[in-house]
Amino acid sequence: MFDLYHEHREQECFEQLCKLIGRKYDLLSYLYFIIDSDRYLPLRSSIFDGVFKKVGIDLQTVGQCSWQNYKEYVGTVADVRDAMKAYYQEEDIDLLDAHSFLWTIALDVLDQYKKDVVFVESERSVKKKLLWKAR
């Protein structure tokens, strides 16, 4: 962890963190976002895959946790940022603005998912699990 924040060996540290804490984009991406919010973004795979599908971007992040995939995700959001800059003729739009824009699209995606949620009883307990219907 020290190397991540002080040595700036992002790719090497990403792989080491994956071994240490598992391939969990939620946590890994947030650690990188803390390092440099101009270069990195948080990622909730289950949400962004739905957003990307909705807007016609061919990128899958669920089950794909790797440095290459994360950089592709950030690059894709950077493309959205660049398109927003061009459309709005505004230079002050940053990665986080584009990320937030995509999250607004996610709200619509989440509404659709809520319609597709099925609750089932666990065989071991009465706790309920969410199962997302495949699209």
Image (cartoon, rainbow, N blue to C red):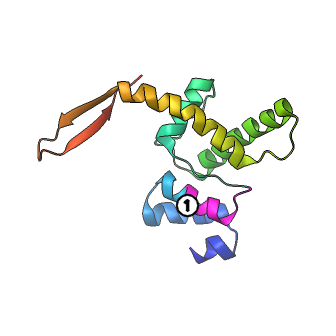
Q: Is residue 43 above or below residue 55?
A: below
Residue type beneath disc 1: Glu
Residue nearest the observer in this picture, 17 or 25? 25
Q: Quadrant of residue 59?
A: top right
Quarter of the figure that contains the C terminus: top left
Find numbered disc 1 in the image and state the secondary structure of the residue it sits on. Answer: helix
Give the left or right position of residue 130, taking residue 87 as reference: left
Q: Quadrant of residue 121?
A: top left
Labels in figure, total: 1
Q: Position of residue 130 (x, y in %)?
A: 29, 37
Q: Main secondary structure of the magenta part?
A: helix
Magenta highlight on residue 14? no
Q: Taking the image as drawn, is residue 51 in sight?
A: yes
For disc 1, the neighbor class at 10 Å (few under 14, some 14 to 19, many from 20) is: some
Quarter of the figure that contains the N terminus: bottom right
Magenta highlight on residue 32? yes
Residue bearing mark 1: 15
Give the left or right position of residue 125, taking residue 17 as reference: left
State the extent of the magenta-drawn residues as a range.
29-38
Residue nearest the observer in this picture, 40 or 100? 100
Which residue is depicted at the point 43% across and 59% down? Answer: 22
Q: Quadrant of residue 37?
A: bottom right
Q: Position of residue 106 (x, y in %)?
A: 54, 34
Q: Position of residue 52 (x, y in %)?
A: 59, 31
Which residue is depicted at the point 67% across and 46% down? Answer: 74
Q: Position of residue 67 (x, y in %)?
A: 60, 52
Which residue is depicted at the point 71% across and 45% down? Answer: 97
Residue nearest the observer in this picture, 79 or 88? 88
Q: Taking the image as drawn, is residue 60 in sight?
A: no
Q: Is residue 5 above or below residue 42?
A: below
